[in-house]
Image: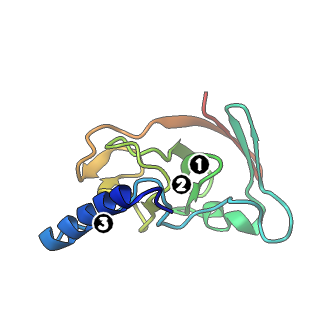
Amino acid sequence: MYSDRKEFLKKAGSVALFAALGIQYTACSSSTGPETNNDDDGNGENPITIEGNKVTLDISSSFFDDLQNQGGMVVSVSGGFLAVNVDGTTIRAFTNVCTHTGCTNNWNLPGDRFVCTCHNSVFNLNGRPISGPAERDLAEFQVSRNGNTVVIDKG
């Protein structure tokens, strides 16, 4: 894991210092929140198709049960987005990259907001920061829906 003793001592010393000061150390690239679409829906099918900047979702899949209803939200690791069903029909999608330090895939979705657990920035369902260190809105993607097919254009 560590290439030499010096590297190990450097990392161990940093962690010990953070612990002594009561500072929680969290890596910025691990996933800590609910996530969808690592591989498939559990039935051998992948409800997400990614072609360039277009991400197509089959929300009839049980993978997207939450997104089928008003207020339902998902985080897609492979698709690189956060999505919310605004009113039972309209779906909005945002980048899953926090505007504070660029953390990805560290999201909790506690009902009516997106929380980046990397440094506790909180965004409303319009992608605007409402607390925490982030000061810029999340980038919003164009979304179109035709029945159970949702296309997110990240371009």
Q: Which residue is mark 3?
A: 12
Q: Nearer the viewer, mark 1 or mark 3?
A: 3
- Is residue 107 visible to us here? yes
Q: Nearer the viewer, mark 2 or mark 3?
A: 3
- The answer to whether 11 appears left or right of 53 in the picture is left
The type of residue carrying mark 3 is: Ala
Residue depicted at 29% across the width and 58% down the height = 10
Is the residue marked by circle 2 packed among few (<14), some (14-19), or many (20+) residues within 10 Å? many
- Which secondary structure, mark 2? strand
Is the residue marked by circle 1 packed among few (<14), some (14-19), or many (20+) residues within 10 Å? many
User: What x and y, as percent, mark residue 7?
Assistant: 36, 56
The disc placed on residue 84 is: 2
User: What x and y, as percent, mark residue 81?
Assistant: 56, 47
Residue depicted at 39% across the width and 58% down the height = 27
Q: Which residue is mark 1?
A: 91
The type of residue carrying mark 1 is: Ile
User: For the view shown, which residue lies furthest in the front direction?
Assistant: 5
- The answer to whether 67 appears left or right of 107 in the picture is right
Seen from the viewer's position, the closer of residues 140 and 23 is 23
Is the residue marked by circle 3 packed among few (<14), some (14-19), or many (20+) residues within 10 Å? few
Q: Are marks 2 and 3 in contact (CB under 8 Å)?
A: no
Vertical placement of residue 75 versus 129, above or below: below
User: What x and y, as percent, mark residue 20?
Assistant: 15, 72
The type of residue carrying mark 2 is: Val
- Which secondary structure, mark 3? helix
